[in-house]
């Protein structure tokens, strides 16, 4: 164990940090205040994943025994039960805790599974089945706004990305087989829709907690779209400038709000796109590898310099 | 004052710079930290990957068909890392760490190629041992907890593959030696953590071992046969009982220590032990997968709800509320995790008889451009 108490006291004595900052830092350093918030979040997330996986397997194995209607009703009931703590917190006018928020996420996910199952069994939307994802996005968004839950908003944005035809996870972006210009266009359209939603949300509710979630989704989807365009000529003629503009915007935003994640997005995605667009056009493996090495070194130097300029808010 | 790494005092001021964020201008602390320069976790991770990739690309460029390319690329990467450290005074910045680790691994691989092919020590692969030693050396040089932990996990796997471990396994049960060795290492790291270290990085290296070794050692012990009901009563009850007792004992010590010392690492180690216990108990009671998953999930959720409710009002300084005011890597992981879970729960494309022409992607696709 180590303690930074002597250094903190020295800074406080010199007047480099104010009383409140010193007291807070000393309390955390000495263990007088200790939060189990990260462990709690991990436990609750594991719980949500396990219940969802168990329900998924149970659905597949017990379909004939229980019957479709019984399954739909049981899952809806379970989802409603999971939402109870969040509903109670809202009615009491207090902020829901981390547990209630994860239970609400479980409720939303169960609802997703229930709707998906009902659609598959009863073909409610027929050939328009993909609108199902839009319906889910809307339902999750309503829940997210009703309970001010960024987690459920993430589920809503994932459904929206699915409706646009983009997976909405990093794995999808790395699956280069899908990285066609068409997919790129969809990802960019989805990112544009999310940015528009973000600005509308910010204008309607200045104190919103959703801005970060919108920003991360929009940034990742936009970069995936631009990189997808960079993979095929002549689309790369549009993809490369777009990638540059996105990288500039991302870095600028990162520096403005003090978030290093946006610096990382801007530099790393730009390096990936540049390497993916140019390297295949060069002749000879050594030249290609040499070019990628130059890009990697330049990206590392740039990221380092930008990170030095970043001023993060106090932890 | 050393040119090769910050002194303990300088490292402590660097830690404080990170801890205080913009509450104190970094320039005010730069002199005390000996002008050593570090970076944040996300940028450090990205720079580590970039450094590692640069070394790998160098190997690709130098490829000449013989093993000397490994040595040359490795030495160039190590030299570049040391140059960044000595001349640019980078510490825990990622780029020099990635270069250094990749360089050491390449040199280790070159040494392994000079040895007898398929050479073994105590019945286990020499190549693996050399790579573990190279990785461990790079981790210790850079005081990087991630790399030293990877080396320790590799060592647990290597020890488990020796003939001595095989002989012990024959007596006490399948793959129990690796679990036992990993648990002992975790317990030793936990005990060492009671000492007061001047260097924060020493603490962090021990913390990572405490947090990850229980679950990593258990993952090497467990196999998917634990989920196969036909093998659940396969006659290794004594081994399973030993594993349960071991995990229970280690988990209890981790929980007690974590709460007493107010440290996160033992609590993560405790959660790892709990995960292992849940898998072992499932095999012991031959429960089908879906009720086991739902049961464990509900237990985790109920425990989480109860703990959150109890600690919403701090008890003896212990709280369930977040103390961080800025977005951290865990927040980013949480958003990504929610998106991943939502994707798994969402609908998939209907069977092939549908007239819908998918727009790509397992998660539906085509809402924007599907042809019907």
Image (cartoon, coloured by chain):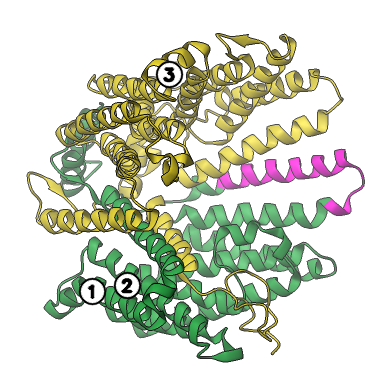
| Along the line of sight, the residue nearer the viewer: A135 or B261 | A135
Q: Is residue B177 left or right of residue A218?
A: left
Which residue is the extreme one toward the right?
A283
- Disc 2, SS: helix
The C terminus of chain B, quarter of image = bottom right
Mark drawn on residue A81 = 1
Mark drawn on residue B169 = 3
Q: Is residue B333 above or below residue B91?
A: below
Q: Which chain is green?
A: A
Q: Which chain is yellow?
A: B
How far is disc 1 from disc 3 in space, using C-alphas? 47 Å
Name the image quarter holding residue B366.
bottom right
The magenta-colored residue range is A280-305
| Along the line of sight, the residue nearer the viewer: A213 or B284 | B284
Q: Main secondary structure of the magenta part?
A: helix
A248 is within the stretch colored magenta: no
């Amino acid at each position: 164990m180590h303690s930074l108490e002597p250094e903190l006291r020295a800074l406080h004595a010199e007047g480099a940090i104010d009383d409140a900052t010193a007291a807070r830092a000393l309390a955390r350093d000495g263990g007088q205040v200790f939060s189990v918030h990260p462990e709690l979040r991990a436990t609750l997330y594991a719980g949500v994943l396990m219940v969802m996986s168990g329900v998924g397997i149970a659905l597949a194995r017990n379909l004939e025994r229980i019957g479709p209607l019984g399954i739909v009703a049981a899952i809806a009931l379970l989802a409603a039960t999971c939402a109870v703590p969040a509903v109670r917190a809202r009615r009491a006018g207090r902020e829901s805790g981390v547990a209630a928020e994860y239970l609400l996420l479980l409720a939303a996910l169960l609802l997703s599974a229930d709707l998906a199952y009902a659609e598959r069994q009863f073909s409610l939307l027929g050939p328009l089945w993909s609108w199902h994802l839009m319906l889910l996005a809307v339902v999750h968004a309503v829940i997210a706004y009703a309970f001010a839950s960024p987690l459920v908003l993430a589920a809503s944005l994932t459904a929206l990305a699915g409706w646009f035809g983009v997976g909405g996870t990093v794995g999808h972006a790395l699956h280069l087989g899908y990285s066609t210009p068409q997919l790129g266009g969809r990802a960019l359209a989805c990112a544009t829709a999310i940015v528009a939603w973000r600005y509308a949300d910010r204008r309607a509710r200045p104190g919103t907690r959703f801005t970060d979630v919108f920003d991360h989704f929009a940034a990742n989807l936009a970069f995936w779209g631009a990189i997808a365009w960079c993979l095929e000529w002549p689309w790369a003629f549009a993809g490369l400038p777009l990638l540059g503009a996105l990288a500039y915007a991302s870095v600028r935003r990162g520096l403005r709000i003090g978030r290093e994640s946006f610096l990382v997005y801007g530099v790393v995605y730009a390096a990936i796109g540049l390497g993916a667009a140019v390297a295949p056009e060069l002749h000879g493996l050594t030249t290609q590898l040499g070019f990628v090495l130059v890009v990697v070194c330049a990206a590392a130097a740039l990221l380092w310099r930008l990170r030095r300029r970043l001023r993060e808010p106090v932890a | 004052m050393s040119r090769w790494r910050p002194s303990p005092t300088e490292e402590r001021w660097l830690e404080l710079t990170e801890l205080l964020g913009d509450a104190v201008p970094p320039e005010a602390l730069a002199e005390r930290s000996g002008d050593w320069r570090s970076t944040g976790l996300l940028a450090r991770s990205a720079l580590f990957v970039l450094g590692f990739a640069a070394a790998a690309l160098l190997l690709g460029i130098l490829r000449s068909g013989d093993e000397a390319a490994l040595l040359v690329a490795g030495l160039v990467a190590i030299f570049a890392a040391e140059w960044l450290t000595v001349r640019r005074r980078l510490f825990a910045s990622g780029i020099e760490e990635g270069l250094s680790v990749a360089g050491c691994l390449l040199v280790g691989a070159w040494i392994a190629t000079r040895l007898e092919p398929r050479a073994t020590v105590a019945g286990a692969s020499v190549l693996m041992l050399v790579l573990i030693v190279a990785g461990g050396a790079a981790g210790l040089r850079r005081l990087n907890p991630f790399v030293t932990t990877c080396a320790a996990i590799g060592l647990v796997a290597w020890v488990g593959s020796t003939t001595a471990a095989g002989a012990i396994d024959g007596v006490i049960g399948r793959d129990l030696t690796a679990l036992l060795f990993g648990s002992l290492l975790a317990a030793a790291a936990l005990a060492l953590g009671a000492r007061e270290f001047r260097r924060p990085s020493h603490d962090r290296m021990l913390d990572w071992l405490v947090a990850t070794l229980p679950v990593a050692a258990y993952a090497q012990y467990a196999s998917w046969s634990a989920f196969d009901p036909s093998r659940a009563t396969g006659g290794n009850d004594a081994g399973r009982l030993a594993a349960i007792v071991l995990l229970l004992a280690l988990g209890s010590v981790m929980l007690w220590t974590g709460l007493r010392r107010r440290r996160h690492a033992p609590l993560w180690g405790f959660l790892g032990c709990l995960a292992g216990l849940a898998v072992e108990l499932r095999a012991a009671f031959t429960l089908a997968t879906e009720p086991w998953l739902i049961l464990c999930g509900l237990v985790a959720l109920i425990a989480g709800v109860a703990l959150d409710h109890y600690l919403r009002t701090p008890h003896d300084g212990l709280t369930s509320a977040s103390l961080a005011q800025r977005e951290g890597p865990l927040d980013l992981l949480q958003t990504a995790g929610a998106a991943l879970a939502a994707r798994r729960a969402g609908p998939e494309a209907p069977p092939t008889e549908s007239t819908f022409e998918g727009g790509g992607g397992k998660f539906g696709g085509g809402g924007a451009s599907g042809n019907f």
